[in-house]
Image (tube, rainbow, N blue to C red):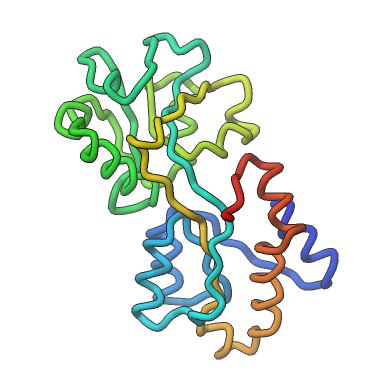
Amino acid sequence: MELIKNFEKRTGAKIEVHYGGSAEIYGILSTTGCDVFIPGSYYYTKIAMEKGYIINSTVKNVTLHIPVIAVPKGNPKNITNLSDLAKSNIKIVLGDPKACAIGKVAEKILKKNHLWKNVSKNVIVYAPTVNQLLIYIATKQADAAIIWKDMATWAEAKGKIQIINIPRKQNIIKTIPTAVTTYAKKDGSLKLAEAFNNYIASKEGLKIWKKWGFIPCK
């Protein structure tokens, strides 16, 4: 990740990163611990704050996290909106609501629009990570998924998927927060954790987020 490489070059520090679904990385935070926590939804930061895992003053909402419909290139099933996901001949993949932020928000979006009952009948897989959803669409194993909009910039997606925006009134837009944890105090990494936390939310950091398809929070 460009942000990490830049920070390591600037400070000489070595940043160890664990990538995973929001529920998975929250599990790491609550067991073995970590110094900086960056889930895909503020929901998990809120829980971490309530449990005392987060230094509350360090919480920063960095970018918007916008759900979209993803389909294979060429859109073979001609999906144009959320309602199309309920058609009987559509194979859908969604994130597991108990494992990743996109799964939780996709379920809420479909329920908000009174589509959950019919769309869930078309779901062939509930994936534990959003990365797996992208693979299903890029390899044409499914007709549609709900993923994050920024994923369209990923190498795995380019030339292989198309994005269909969900109207704002129908959508539930989340934020990606970053925060320093109380573990950073315990393991002596507080100053470095604060520096990294500040960098990824800085003007320079936000330019990099934007480069990769994210929309910075105001």
- Between 123 and 60, the one lying in front of the other is 60
Q: Residue at x 69, y 52 (%)?
A: 1
In this image, 87 relative to 36: left or right?
A: left
Image coords of residue 142 (percent x, y): 37, 22
The quadrant in which the C terminus is found is bottom right
Please state which of residues 84 and 37 is positioned toward the viewer in this rendering: 84
Picture quarter containing residue 121? top left
Vertically, is 47 above or below 1? below
Image coordinates of residue 134 in percent, x first then y, are 48, 33
- Residue extending farthest to the left is 117
Name the foreground residue: 2 vs 169. Answer: 169
Label count reads 0
Q: Residue at x 20, y 15 (%)?
A: 88
Residue drawn 77% across the image and 58% down it: 204
Question: What percent of the width, then of the height, locates residue 116?
Answer: 20, 34
Answer above or below: position of 205 versus 85.
below
Image position, residue 115 (x, y; %): 20, 30
Residue 62 quadrant: bottom right
Q: Is residue 111 left or right of residue 208?
A: left
Q: Looking at the image, is 76 positioned above or below residue 158? A: above
Q: Which residue is painted at 45% across and 72% down in the image?
A: 29
Q: Is residue 106 left or right of residue 137?
A: left
Q: Is residue 157 above or below residue 33?
A: above
